[in-house]
Amino acid sequence: MEFRPHIAPEIFALRPDFMALSIFVEGVTNTASTDFSGALLAQACGDLASAPWHDAHLAAWRDAYRTFGAKPQRTPCSAEALRKRCERDGRVPETNAVVDLYNAISIRYAIPVGGEDASAYVGQPQLVRATGDESFDTTADGQPKMETVDKGEVVWRDKRGVTCRRWNWRQGTRTRITEASTSLWFVLERLEPMPVEALLNAGKNLVEGLEAMGPAKGAGFVLLDADNPDGRLHF
């Protein structure tokens, strides 16, 4: 299965320093949350200062949100939302083993991490500015709900609709990773001043965690930036 994300030029016009690490893995056996995945979450929540760039990186994401009209104090990036929950509650609720893992990586490195069921995609993922007529499936009060995104909003989407709103704020229900998911796509999103080496280490730690959970078919790493919006750099 080919899985190659694309980042539109207008995204780099907003943030030339944006960089994304794309990781595609097949043959994963996901499960309900385990002692291992729960411990990863607890350890990450217990050491929020482990990434010395965390304050500056989250501030950079707040600035990035403002460039397309979002209000980060109301809708923070996913990494900031997770860390705020750790500060408020002392923990992040467990979801399933894989989601626990990538949430722990996000908290530990203060970086937005998206995890998606690749088999639910129609075509390839694209990071674009919305036209304003795209659909987004979510829930409200526990019931399915279809929204229309704001024009100019930064969104991840496929041919069917938006899969993540406001760059990395809220994921849609259609592509969420469940215990039945076996083909997985992850995207780790970095701005200055987070070191590129830290971005790569976060990706390696994510794959190591998946391997600790069970066998999977080799992970494919692709780095996307302003010079390589289609991820021509492989490592």
Image (cartoon, rainbow, N blue to C red):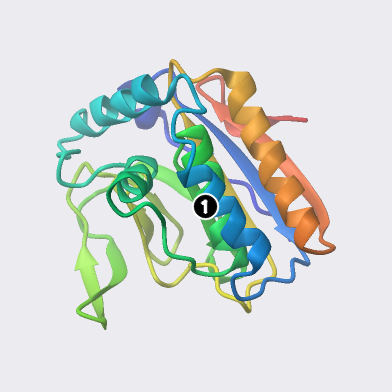
Q: Viewed as shown, does residue 195 lie left or right of 174? A: right
Q: Whole-percent x and y of residue 68?
A: 20, 34
Q: Is residue 165 visible?
A: yes
Q: From this viewpoint, which residue is outermost toward the bottom? A: 143
Q: Viewed as shown, does residue 136 lie left or right of 101? A: left
Q: Is residue 117 visible?
A: no
Residue 198: quarter of image: top right
Q: Whole-percent x and y of residue 179?
A: 61, 76
Which residue does the numbered mark 1 point to in the structure image?
A: 42
Q: Whole-percent x and y of residue 103?
A: 50, 51
Quadrant housing the C terminus: top right
Comparing 53 with 123, the one in front is 53
Q: Amino acid at mark 1?
A: Ala
Q: Residues within 10 Å of mark 1 (few under 14, many from 20)?
A: some
Q: Viewed as shown, does residue 148 lie left or right of 8? A: left
Name the residue at 48% across, 67% down. 175
Residue 235, placed above or below residue 172? above
Name the residue at 60% across, 56% down. 39
Name the residue at 23% across, 77% down. 145
Quadrant housing the N terminus: bottom right
Q: SS for tag 1?
A: helix
Residue 188, placed above or below residue 225? below
Comparing 211 with 157, the one in front is 211
Residue 92, placed above or below residue 228? below
Name the residue at 25% across, 30% down. 62
Comparing 56 with 229, the one in front is 56
Residue 144: quarter of image: bottom left
Q: Whole-percent x and y of residue 97?
A: 61, 66
